[in-house]
Every structure is written in C-alpha cells, then in structure tokens.
Image (spheres, coloured by chain):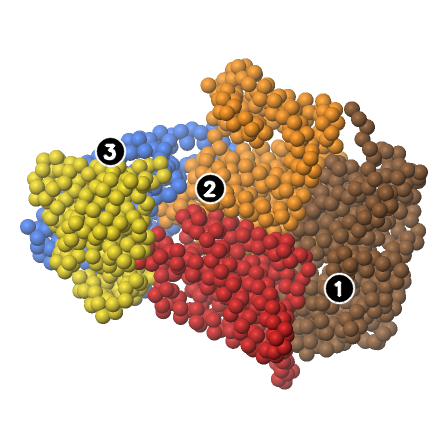
Chain colours: A brown, B red, C blue, D yellow, E orange
Amino acid sequence: GKKRETIIKIGINAPITGDIPKVGEGSKYAAQMWLEDIEKAGGLQVGDKKYPVALVIEDNESKAESAVKANTKMITEDGVMVIIGPQSSKQAVPAGGVANDYQTPMISPWSTNPDTTKDRPFVFRACFLDPFQGPVAAKFVKEEFGYTKAAVLYDVASDYPKGLAEFFKMAWEEINGPDSVVAYESFTTKDTDFSSQLTKIKDSGAEFLFTPQYYNEVALIVKQAHELGFNNPIIGSDSWGSAETVSLCGEDCYGLFFSSHYAAAGAQGATKEFIDRYQQKHGYVPDDVAALTWDAIRLAQQAIENTGGLSGDIKKDRVAVRDQLAKIKDFAGITGNMTFTEEGDPIKCAVIVRISDQGEYEFYKQVCP
Amino acid sequence: MAFFLQNVINALQWGSFYALIALGYSMVYSILMLFNFTHGDIFMTGTYIGFGVATALVALATALSWSMPGWLLLVLTIIIAMFLTSILGVVVERVGYRPLREAPRASAAITGLMIGIMLEYGNLAILGTQRYNFPSIIETVTYDVGGVFFTNKKILIVGVALLLMIALHQFIHKTRWGMAMRAMSYDFQVVPLMGVSLNVIAPMTFAIGSALAAAGGILYGMAYPVLDPFMGILLGWKSFVAAILGGRGSILGAALAGFLLGFIEIFTAMVFPSTFRDLIAYSIILLILTFRPYGFFGQAHSAQLRL
Amino acid sequence: MNTSAVHNPPLLQVIEMTHFFGGLRAVHDYNLTLMPGQIRGLIGPNGAGKTTIFNLITGIHTPTRGRIELEGRNLVGLRPHQIAASGLGRTFQNMLLWRHMTVLEHVRLAHYAQLKYGLAGAFFGSRLRYAEEQRVADNSMRLLETFDVARFADQIVTNLPYGVQRRVEMARAMATEPKVLFLDEPTAGMTPEELVQMIGIIRKIHEEFKVAILLIEHRLKFVMELCERIQTLVFGEVIAEGTPEEIKNNPDVIEAYLGKEEVA
Amino acid sequence: MQLTVENLHVSYGQIKALHGLGFSIVQGEIVCIIGANGAGKSTTLRAISRLVDAEKGSHMVFEGKDLLKFQPDKVVSELGISHVPEGRRLFGNLTVMENLQLATFARRDRALIKENLETVFEIFPRLLERESQLSATLSGGEQQMLAVGRAYMTGRKMMLLDEPSMGLAPLMMLSMFDALKEINRAGTTILLVEQNARLALKFAQRGYVIENGRIVLEGESRALLENPDVKKAYLGG
Amino acid sequence: MATQIPQTSTSEHASAGFLPRIGRSLAVVPALGWLIGVLCAVIIEYVIGDTLAVMLYLPKVPALFGTTLVLKEPLLFPSALLFVLLVYALPIGAVARMSAGWTNRAAVALERVPIWLSVLVHLGLLYAVLHVWTEASDYRLQVAKLIMIAVMLTLSINVINGYMGEFSCSHPGFMALGAYASSVFTLLLFKQDRLFGAALLPESLGPYFFPIALVIGGAAAALGALVVAIPSFRTRGDYLAIISLAFMFIVKSAIENIEPIGGPRGMGGQPHWSTLPAVFAGMAICIWIINNFVRSTMGKALNAVRDNEIAADAMTVNTRRTKMVAFMFGAFWAGVAGGFYAHEVRHVTPGSFGIQMLAEVLAMVYFGGLNSVVGSIVGAVSISMISEILKPLQLYKWIIIPLILILVMIFRPTGLVAFRDFDIKRILGARR
Ligand SMILES: Nc1ncnc2c1ncn2[C@@H]1O[C@H](COP(=O)(O)OP(=O)(O)OP(=O)(O)O)[C@@H](O)[C@H]1O
Ligand SMILES: Nc1ncnc2c1ncn2[C@@H]1O[C@H](COP(=O)(O)OP(=O)(O)OP(=O)(O)O)[C@@H](O)[C@H]1O
Ligand SMILES: [Mg+2]
Ligand SMILES: [Mg+2]
C-alpha cells in the first residue's frame, strides 16, 4: 500500500438547499474565501510543517436529520478535523450531539440556542447568546429614549426570534416593572401578513416595537406598521444585519436601530477588508452569517495553528484542536473580540447600529458585557 | 371600534389573497379533479414574472424618458404577466398532467408537487438566493378615517378579488365552456362525445388558473413586496384548504372560504394570544369540515377519490 | 294481509314506509310481507321508487316514516353493515364492484361479519385466523362455482364481461349468508340466453340456501317465471299486488307499465 | 355507403378485443349488432367514435372521409356521429337541462337546437319534469332516457346506441324505440348494439352477429330471426 | 427474484449479451442463497476492504457502493466500480450460484418447518449481513438506520393512502406525536435533563424500556389519529385530505406552544437507543404485522372502503371500524417510526414535522407503489438512497429528483411495485 498524505479537512455543514438557502450560500462563500487565502499561502502552517487544506461542504437541507447525517459522514467518512456549522439551532443542536460524541470540535457560527453547546465540551459557537443580546437592546432603548412601554413582535416557530424576544421581555420588565411590555405578539414562520398583530400593538399604546426578525420579515413588518399608522421607532437585533434589509425595506427603515456584531458602513480594518472582498466577489454586502462563518473558521484555523504540530492521528489532533479552541483568549474577529466561556460560548461586545438616511449601517454605540 | 374595524379591513385584504389564489386553485382543482399542488409555485413564478415585466417596463419607460402613469404600468404588467404565466400553465398541463389523465389522481398530485419543487429550485438556480423587492408600481396612498387606516392598494386588491370571483362564477355556471369544464370534472372520458375537445378544455383551465395566479401574485407583490422562491408553498397549501373548504366544484365557495380563512386567521390573532393563532385557526377549520363534511357548497358524490 | 302469518311469522315485514327526497315523495306507504323462502317481484315504471325501496330497507337511506322488521327485529336506524349482517344481502342496479380487487377477494370479503379472529388475529396471524381464512376461501370458491365464475377467480373484476360481473356481484351477496336477497335488475345487460341461465341459477340458490328473494326487473319473462307474487309500483305507491297471472291481466298495470303490445 | 369499417383491430393493453372486424352501413338504415357478453360490441362503437384507438391496418370511412384522422370530439362535431355510451355516462354534477345543453357545445344552429330540445322532451316527458334535478340522482331508467336525449342533441347524421334499452320499463322501451324510429325517419342512420337480440332484430332492418371480435353472420333482420343458429345462441331457444 | 441484487444488475450493464444468460443461471438461486452470497461479500469487505481501497486509490472503503463518491470525484468512478465488482458483484454471484444446490435443499427443508421459523432464519442472516456491513462505517450505519425508519413510515402511510385510498396529509403530525411522546417518556425516566429534572430510574435499565417508549409513542399517535378518523366517517377524499392537513398544522402549532417540552426549540438529549438491532427488529415487526393485516380478509376491507364504500357497507363490512383501525394502525406505526427517529437524531423540533417531510413521505409512498408492502420498501429505500447520492449536486438535486419522480409517475402511474401482495412463502421458497 501507500501512505496517505495528511490533509487538513474542514467540514462545512450548511443549509444549501431547504428553506434558507441564502444562509447556506453565505456560509459557503465565506468558507471558500478563507480557503483561497490558505491556498494562496501554500497551505496551513502548523508547527514546522505546511499542510494542504480541503473543505468538505455538506448540504444539510435545513433538516435536523440531514445535519446529523452530514456530521456523521464528515467525521467518519471524510475525516474532517473541525466542523463549521450548522447555522440554525434546529440543526445545530442535534448535529452538535454527534460532533461531541465523536470528539470532533464543532463551531456553530449562528446558533443561539443554549442547548447547542451545553454540556458539550467539543461544541462552540461564534455568536452571542440571547441572554446577552436581549438586555443590550432593552438597556439601549431605555437609555436612549427613556420609553416605558414596549411592544414585541416575533416568530414563535423559530428558535432565534423566540428566544431573543423572551430575554428582551425579561430585561425590559426588570427595568420598567411588570406589564411594561404592553404587547407581546407573535406569528409563524413564512407569514407575510402581520396586520392583526400590528393593529394590536398600535392599540396597546406601545412607544416602540422590538422585532428580532430576519431581514425579509423586517421589510414587511416595518412597511405594514407604517401603513397601519404606527410610526414609533422599531428596534431590531443582529438578524437585521444583512444588506438586504435595506434593499428590501427601503426608506421605511431609515433611522431605525438594531443591535449587532458589527456595522458594515463604519467598518475598519479586517472587517472592512472582508466586506469589500466579499462584495467584490459576490456582488452584495455580506450578512452576519457570512461574517460569523468567517470568524468561526478563522477561530478553527487559530486553534489548529496553536496546537503547534499535528500527530497525523486524526482522533488525537481533534482533541488537541478542541483544547486549543477552549484556550483562545481575545481572538480578534471581524465581528468583535472573543473569548470562550466554559460552555464554549463567546464573550463579545455588541454594537448598536443605526440605519442612516442613505440606508447605510452606521456605528452608533458599543455595548460590552 | 376603530380597532375592530381596522381588523375587518386587515382581514379583508388578507382574505382576498387567499380568495384570489384559491380561485385559481379551484379552477384547476374542481375542473380537472386534481390536487393542483403546483399552483402555489405557479403563483410564485407569476409574481416573479410580474416583477420582471414591471422592472422591464419601468426601464423601458425611463429609457424612452416617458413618465408612464402608475395605473397604466399596473394594467400592462398584469396583462403581460397573466399571458406569460398562462403559457407556463399550459406547459405544466402538457408535461405534468396530460400524460396522467387516466392515472390515479394522487399520482397527478405527486407530479404537481414535483413540478412545484422544480419551479422553486429552478428559480433558485437561475436567480440565486437573493430576495427581490417588488417595485411599488403605484404610489401608496394611506387614508386615515377615524383611526382606521387603509391604503389605495388594499381597496384595489379587495375589489379585484371580488370582481374576479363573480366573473369566474358566471363563467363556470353560465357559459358552455364552463359547463364543459364542470362536465369534465365528473367524467372526462365521455366529454369528447359532446363534441368538446379535452385537449382544449384542460389547457384552457390551466391557463385561466395560472393567469389568475399571476394577477394574484402581482397584487400580492404590491402588498408584501418581498419575493422569495418559496413564497408560494404555504399560500398554495392554504388556498388548497380554502378551495376545498368551499366545496369541490364551487368557485364561489372557494373564494368565500378564502375570505373566511383570512378572517379566521386575523381574528384569532386579534382575540387570542397570537401564539395560538395556527392552533385555533386550524382547529376551527377542522371543526367546520367535521360538521359540514362537504365544505360550504360541495356535494357528497363529489368526494370520491379516483384511484 | 297474509293469513298464514299466524302460524308462520313473516321473515321481513315493511310497514307503511314513506320516503321523501327533499320535496319529492319517492315512496309512499309501502308495505311488504315476505315469507321465508318466498320469491317476490317488484315492477314498475322508471323512477317509480323501486331502487329507493331497496335502499331504504338496506339502510342506505333512512325512511322518513315507517317500520322495517326482520324476523320481528327492527331495522330502522341500524347502520347498513349491521342490516346486511343481520341477513339482508343485495346487488346494485349499477353494480358496485371493487375496481382493484379480484373476483375471489370480492366473495371472501363478503364474509366479513362472520370473521371471529378479531384484530389480534389480523395483526399477528393466530391459528384461528388461518383456520377461518381457509374456511372462507373454501366457501368462496364453492360460491363461485355455483355461479359458474370460478375460472375468473384471480382476475380483477373490471376487465370482465358484464354478465360475469353481474354473477360475481350475486355471488358476493350470497357470501353474506343472507336470509333475504335483494336483486336490482339482475339481468340488465344480459343476453336472452344468459337470462335463461340466470333463472336456473336463482332457482338453484333459492333451493340450496333457502333464501327469500325480492327482485326488481323489467324483463317480464324473468319475473313471471320466477316470482310467486308481484307488486307493481307507480309513483312510489303500490297499485297492484298479486300472482303473475293477476298482474299480467291487471288493466292498471297494463296502462301504467306493460303497454298493450307487450301483453299481446 | 355512409360508413364502411374494414379490418378493425382494437386491443386494451394485452387483451385483444377486435380481430379485423368489418361491416358497412347505408345512409338512413337501422342496423344492429348482436353478440354475447364481451364479444366486442361496445368496443366497435367506441372505435367508431374514436374513444379507443384502432390498430394499424384498420380502415374506417365515413361519408368518404377517413374516420381515423378525426379526433373524438371532431367525430361528433364535424361528422355528426353521436354515441350513447354503455353505462349511460351522464355528467352527474350537471342538471338534466345542462346535460342536454352541453351536448350542443359545437353546434351553432340555435333555432334547430330549440326545436330538438322540444322533441326530446316530447319523447321523454319525464325529463322535462326533472329538468333541474342533478342527473346523478335520477333513477336508472330516467338516466337512460337522458343519455339517449343527450345523444340526440349532439349530432344527428348517425347515432350509435349501446344498449339503450337497458333498465327501461317495457312501456318506456316501446316508446323509446318508437321515438328512435321517428328519428331515423327524419334521416338519422342508427347503429344499435343490443343484448336483447330479439328486440334489436325486430327493430332493425339488418343485423350483424359478432363473436370474439369478428363478424360471424350478417343479413336481413328477418332472416336472422329465423336463422336456427341465431335462435339457439341469442334468442333464448 | 432478481430484485434482491441491484449491484449486479447495475454494474454489469456493459455485457448486455451476457445478461440474459447470467440472469437465467442465477434464477435458480433461492433467497437463502442470495443472503449467504451477500454475507460472504460483506465479510470479504470487512476483511480486505481497507487494503483493497488503498490499492485502488480510494480514500476509504466506499460507504454506499461508491455512489456518494461519483458525483464529488468523478475520477474515482472506475476504482469505485471495480471495488464494487470485486467485493460485491462477483462474490455474491459466485457464492449464490455455487451454493444454489444446497441452499435450495435447505430452502426445501425450511418449507416444511413452521413459516415463522423459516422467516427467523432468513431474518437472522439478513441481520448478520447488515451488522457486518455497517461495521465498516458509522455513516453507513446511520444511513441504514434512517432508511429503515423511512421504510416504517412509508409502510404506515401506505396503509392509509394506498390500501384505504384516502389522501392523508397528517403523517408528519403522527410522527411528531410519536417522537415527542416517546422522548418525554425516556427523558422523564432515564435522563437528567433541563426539562424534567433528575432521572427517575438508572439509565442502564433504559434499553429494556425502549420498546415501551416506542409503544407509548405509537399509542400517542394512534390517539391523535382519532381526530382524523372520526371525521372520516362522514367525509372523504379531498375534504379528508384537508382535515388531515389541518391536523398536521395543529400538532405542529400545539407543540410550539407547550413550553415544558421545549416549544419551538424542541427537545434534545434523548439517549441513543436506536441501535441497529433495535431498528432492525422494529422494522421487521412492522413489516410483519402490516403485511399480516393487509393480507387478511379484515385488512382487505380497507380496499373495499377505498373502491366503493356503499358496497362495502352492504357486504357487512363495518366501514367505520375499518377506517378507525386503518387510521389508528397507520398512525401507530408512524408514531413508532417517530420514536426511533427521536432516539436516533436525538433532538426533535416541531419545525421538522412539516410540509417538507410530508412531501418526502408522499414521494416515497407513491414512487414505490400503492397498495403494496414491497412497493413501500422499494420507495423508501430508493428515494432515501437517491437523495443521499445526489447531495453533492446541491440545488440541482431538487430538480433531478422531481424529474425522476415525474417520469416514474408517467410511465407507472401507480408507482413502481403497486398492487402486489408480499408473499413471504413464495419469496423464501426454493427455486426450480
Ligand atoms: N338523491 C335523490 N334526490 C332526489 N331525487 C331522487 C334521489 N334519488 C332518487 N330520486 C328520484 O326518486 C325517484 C325514484 O328513484 P328510483 O331510483 O327508486 O327509481 P326506480 O324505480 O328504481 O327506477 P328505475 O327502474 O328507472 O331504476 C326517481 O324519480 C328519482 O329521480
Ligand atoms: N377497459 C378495458 N380494459 C381491458 N379490457 C377490456 C376493456 N373494455 C373491454 N375489454 C375487453 O374487451 C372485450 C370486448 O369488450 P366489449 O365491452 O366491447 O364487449 P361487449 O360486446 O360490449 O360486451 P357486453 O355485452 O358485456 O357489453 C372483452 O373481453 C372485455 O373484457
Ligand atoms: Mg332502479
Ligand atoms: Mg358492451
């Protein structure tokens, strides 16, 4: 026989098909950009050796079952060292179980569900969690506007908005007393008509609306709110942070605020470089998924480099990588500086972004834990 | 009171979309006895076509530096898009349904479902994952009557839905063509013995249904201007619910059930915590069908599934 | 009506049965006393309500008014399968066969009410089940032979000639072990030759299984030859009842149903 | 010859129903086809109205035109051949009136349509009574009347009747055959398929006997009625 | 007959002239022979697979006969093909053919013992095959398990949609009920868990309770099925389809609203009890019971209800009971499949049991064939495999799979193997 060469394989578990293909695309593009960089450098330098790198991109079809299969396949068949993804908690939670069982480090860039990383030493994430972001938004509104009556509109059937809505409500009521969230309304994924909920919100006398929804829904919610005569501020979360929010929503969204990882318009340094490169290549400003995927994969790279040399035994190397990941301090990501907690969740700062009157994302304020 | 009226208006608009889409659905469904699972995706494609046509027309007008009035743009868009989409409908009939005319109905339902998936992913493959913003063809004007808000678009939408409902009902029940269509739903094999060509009636039915989907799609795009390749799925299934709730073969029933569905959804969200909306709305539908087993206007004999 | 009823209770008795379809009175005050082993005929112009009477007795429609008793037990309000299981077998004017099932399966399935193995037997295949299935299969084959259709046993019914289908339908009805058999135009679509054969078959099952038979028929030869008594129904009402001879010569019947030529 | 059929072959999948059958009809005739169950009578009629496809080599000419070139709907609308199919096949979800109106789909002669409609109601007064009843709820015999009436309304150069007497009460049967005679006298050729051979032969001028997809005997009705083989096989002894 | 060996028939396409002759000479091999052949093949793979793979420049033993490789790295296609030929096709063919003599004699002997014994022997062999085969790769194992779960699901929907002819859309709902009910049971009893707190029983006891968990899942689904079954007394066809669809939405929405079981976040942490023997046994029992049922006269009542309900009633068939049984029975197995699913994927969310899953199971059942146990098996296996194989095509996969399905529907409108009885005696019998 012949000895096989060691290739560092990075698995990407992304929803290329299914109901959120845009998310899959962002992850894929970010990963491919990273691979280009590495290939340009002639490989990944670990210790005193340069290793070739390959991406294994598996489609999880936005289904839990497929995400689990994809992880199993990448780990047992392809022999990946690290897995980046899945993005949604619906897939990340079960897939994380697989990664943990096989002792393979996995970083979900986007999943906010605590269960993803809970009691799973091998699973990490690159985004902040709801318990952090919810209060950030609540505090910001209180400090900025001094309002006392809040309304919330969120998607019950979706993990992320629901979690964030709950933590926001908790934080807001802590600040303003019980019943200060005067309307707590919901809808279901893929709904497009929110008139009933918005009518209720308007009727409740809320001074502003917090809606932690994805960009396609934001456009509809904001427009419909205006059509129904609700002209108070509408506040959002990091899921607004896609260029499409503004392109879909248009002037209706100008002047609104949301909390996020980074502000594209005022971005500097590595962040700006990433945004420009991505935009040049794919024709649009990357959204938070792409940015977080980029950070996740760079985190993985950092950890691999930090091992100081690979043994060639994939099982041992995976454990080494995971140990290095857990040790990373103050990693300078394009979405902020990160340090992992015990659970594998990052401690990072949030920024408040304002959508300018030109429709750009301006840095407004930074909030750190 | 304003709160209630506002919700009535909300429900009218939302219901008119269900009604509009259910009309098109019901055309094909009640005439050809097919679960037309493609309809939602034809609706989606129609919306995209409308988007393309409107964008092209605006570009053309700009190029010729001619300021086209909004209503003309709208009418032109609707007509062209209806025409193009009806061609799509005819093609779908030809490849997906005609070969299966003698087959179990459920098989045709599966091909329909599959053609729908192909349209979704075909769209995704061609246009990419980006979402598009439907151009605001006519200027939105918001009226505020004693705290009740509505826009000119809403009036237009409800009006068009009602108009089409009546027109289509008349067509199905008063014309020879309509009669032939209904006959076809009962026993297509002997329809030729009446001197009626199946290969004219069936494509025509699809064409009308698809054209309606396009009209609905454009209005929908104006009201909810975010286009997405999967936007037709849920609407398609819900219009399926409406078409059947109305009773097989009844165009009027389908449209009314569409409005009812809109009212149920809006008003359950109004009265109950909105997290329970689907739970309650669908329970109501389930109850309605349990106690009116053949929908509003359906007949018992029409329930048989051909296998 | 029937004096012998004192000694010999009637098998099936229908008393003043009336039925409306919306505003249309399809059956009006219909009475019937069917004795065990009797063969009776029901004739009448088209749309007189004959099929409706069958549907009422067998539970497909519920009569607006009236009583139906089988061996003294009330049938009104029972579900059709209960009525069938209690001893009323029937065929349909338009033949309601099961398109995807074979001839043998048709007859086997009609033994449904006689199965005793229950769901557990069906799921797990108990010994009782195999014994019963065997018995049912044997009995079915016997019936198919009686009706001379055994050679089609494994064929799907839809592809068979009309006459064969009619006989399959009768075999199926006999498999329910009826005490009374209702036949709705059993010879429709048959050649005269088959008609003669059918007379033989009906005689045979009548003797062999001791069933009482009530039949609707427009082919007079058939009715006259088989029936002891005949009722003539016009617009939902019985206008004449009697032996074939009496009916044939009844002027009302001639006027409303037979026509002068036919009798001549 | 108004209709000539030669070498007609038809199969249903694996099952071959007609084996090169042939016959011909003169304008204005009443011709009947008799035969046992499954002999292929209905198939013959279906082949003429193009509801089933004839195989290669088959040959059918109607008034000088190649029948095989016509779509089934055109056979009705352009050639004027109407067909009362086996088992009636009414549109149960349409009313009696609508069934009759639909039958005139391809016709433009409004005045004549009105007249024909009156004729139908004259022959079958019961249909007039039930004008707005859904045809699915008609009694068996009423449905048969409607089926004949409907065919009368479509095209009237030639009528193909598949067991029109099925389920009709004796009196009604007589009046229907009288009506058919009337229709025939007005110029419509009639091709009748009947199980009830005696009746058919009494009614028709000529007859064909079909067995296993082939014509085995033909002749004047009277002759056939006397023919001992026919007597034995089809007239019940 | 020859359906048992897809490998040989696909890989030997080139030698078309050969094929009939080979086919004829293989026709004498009984099921037993095939099983033994396949067992030999998987043992060969187990022993020399790795070495052979290295020699053929394959990165690894091809997990699914090299099919997953082909689209990603077309250059490896010849190696993969050769691997399959050497490891599977040849040994299977050779062993099966050569042993035909004594396997036929054994089959004859087995015909004389009670049928269940013969079935057990064959199942044992089949399990051995699967066991050795899945030893090679965990991915293979997982795919195999998920396919077997899909088989159960497809069979269960065939009972309603195929045998009884109702277009039921509620299966994802039934499956969700089963998945959740069984998960609640196991999490409550055996797991320290965020939702229900400490375990009540030691986890080591768990696997013995797994069947109970599955039955509970099935029972929950069966109870849920009442919601659809009762309206089915009065309506059917399209109207019932809508009722069942509404039921599916109701289940999803209800679960989303019950916080104690995780709401939209779902419920995770189920123990990994869906092991190969468990799933295999589950599937075998499912096939056995469903096949028993649909072949009994009582089961044929489903067909009668489908083809003509009035006639069924008039022939003493209790149609209400029949419908009730069909719905509850079908739902039960969907629930059991859900239980297996939950303990394999180990996380369930209401969002997974929606329209997408509905489209998939419908595709499987109609592709495989209505009214046929074999059809369901064929449908579930082939759709799952095709879907796995075409994954590298990403978007285009969802254009190709529909295309395949449309073609199948056009040329075989009732599915590949429709309306056929699954006659175990004939399949296991000797060949002469
Ligand atoms: N569901 C219904 N709704 C309205 N009218 C009906 C319905 N069913 C039957 N009828 C009418 O009731 C009358 C009796 O019908 P029935 O079928 O009993 O007649 P029949 O005596 O069997 O006639 P035939 O000999 O023609 O079969 C008919 O005039 C028919 O049109
Ligand atoms: N749709 C079909 N599929 C398969 N075989 C058919 C079909 N229709 C008819 N056949 C077969 O074709 C042959 C001729 O049938 P056809 O209906 O023409 O006979 P027929 O003479 O009209 O008989 P009947 O007196 O019973 O109406 C028969 O053997 C029949 O079984
Ligand atoms: Mg009748
Ligand atoms: Mg015939």
- Mark 2 vs mark 1, CA separation in Å: 48 Å
| x, y percent for residue A221 | 69, 69
Is C166 on the left or on the right of D176, as rendered?
right
Residue at mark 1: A243
The percent position of residue B255, horizontal first and vertical second, equals 49, 67
State whether discs 3 and 2 lie on one chain.
Answer: no
Residue at the extreme bottom? B146
Residue depth check, mark 3 versus mark 2: number of the one nearer the observer: 2
Density class for disc 2 (Cα within 10 Å; few <14, some 14-19, many ≥20) is: some
The residue that disc 2 covers is E412
Q: Is C101 on the left-hand or right-hand side of A272? A: left
Which amino acid type corresponds to the residue marked 3 in the rendered image? Glu
Q: Mark 2 lies on which chain?
A: E
Q: In which quarter of the image is ligand 2?
A: top left
Which residue in the protein does label 3 denote?
C208
> Label 2 is placed on what type of residue?
Arg
